[in-house]
Image (cartoon, rainbow, N blue to C red):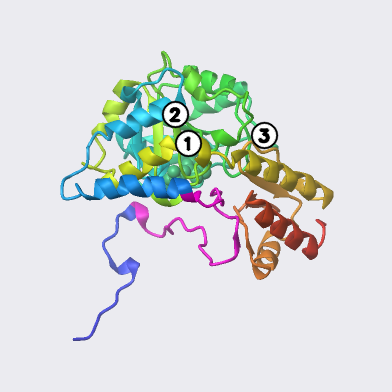
Amino acid sequence: MGRVTVSLSDLPLRDDLRGLTPYGAPQAPLAVALNVNENTHPVPDEVASDILDDIAVALRDVNRYPDREFTALREGFAEYLGHDLDASQIWAGNGSNEVLQHILQAFAGPGRTVFGFAPTYSMYPLLAQGIGARWTAGSRQPDYTITAEDAVAQVIEADPDVIMLCTPNNPTGTPLGLDVVEAVYEASRGIVVVDEAYQEFAPRESASALTLLEGRPRLAVSRTMSKAFAFAGARVGYLAADPAFIDALRLVRLPYHLSALTQAAAVAALRNAPTMLGMVDDIIEQRDRITATLEALDYEPHESWSNFVLFGGVADPQATFHALYERGVLVRDVGIPNHLRVTAGTEAETTAFLDALASIGSAS
Ligand SMILES: *Cc1c(COP(=O)(O)O)cnc(C)c1O
């Protein structure tokens, strides 16, 4: 029997998915991978064995479906976030990407619009597309900041069903003032999502949008364990919002969407939060070293409150990307002309990147 191969175009794919390409940050086996904003520090040994103990216990009951309401995990996140939150205001999923997908499934969908200020997280348009909603991109100032006045004007014009506010913003690192969040909320009728995937890397004294939740039932603040928490491979993201908002997400999640093993691992990791987050200060130090060194090399780094730096002044991003690649360093070409993005790694990885870049020559 011959095996017949067909191509994607031969299949009865949804019309609105024809011609699209899947999300695909390269996963190349390079020694220094600084391309997807992970915490590149490995999970400390003592934490890994503590997590393993909890997974071992969960494994004994894995013949049964897990707690559909992942109660212990929600309690853990409420405690971690503080701000007087309780478990009824918490949701979680397999990465904050799934959490964001739940939001769009519940509040967007065919005929509805999802809005964000570009350049922003490349998954937003893909998540919108996946559920048949329309993505509308607003704009930012040349330095990627947004004023409340400008944001409000754009939101009124677009009149979206869901607004994605990413702060600090990926791929630019730009913080967004809470005044902008408040103004956008007031000016809109839709859901306002503040994606704080990188909040742990922001200055300690900067306020989170969690402080705005009270009295704003259309607002949600999403977080992830993939960045500061060194837990990207476990796939755990979460959000805080009004209990009614959480109820809406229950309508669209798959039953038992968080496996018992994921729940056990995440609860144990949260119990070890201070150790898991112990490297954050070090990463911030490396980020600031990247910024200072890029400036010395005549590149144009943008202000970053995250664990990565977007820098301009790159004459030929593809050529620089490949020159770094050949030197064993993986960075990200995010498609912004004359720019590249690099994640702050360990001190050794950061040095490897900076040395490799310096060996290619200064910005021209
Ligand atoms: C990395 C990232 C996420 C998190 O993705 P996970 O699915 O939790 O791994 C969410 N939002 C932004 C802006 C990100 O950069």
Badge 3, how many Cα within 10 Å: few under 14, some, many 20+? few
Q: Earlier in the sequence, mark 2 or mark 1?
A: 2
Badge 1, how many Cα within 10 Å: few under 14, some, many 20+? some
Q: Which mark is residue 80?
A: 2
Residue 235 visible in the picture: no
Q: Which residues are magenta?
A: 16-45
Mark 1: which amino acid? Ala
Mark 2: which amino acid? Tyr
Residue 188 to residue 260: above or below: above
Residue 15 to residue 251: above or below: below
Residue 335 visible in the picture: yes
Considering the whole magenta stretch, tell me its main secondary structure: loop
Of badges 2 and 1, nearer the viewer stands 1
Badge 2, how many Cα within 10 Å: few under 14, some, many 20+? few
Q: Quadrant of residue 19?
A: bottom left
Image quadrant where one finds the C terminus: bottom right
Task: Tell me the residue at 64%/67% (across/down).
Answer: 328
Q: Which mark is residue 205?
A: none
Image location (x, y in percent) of residue 29: 54, 67
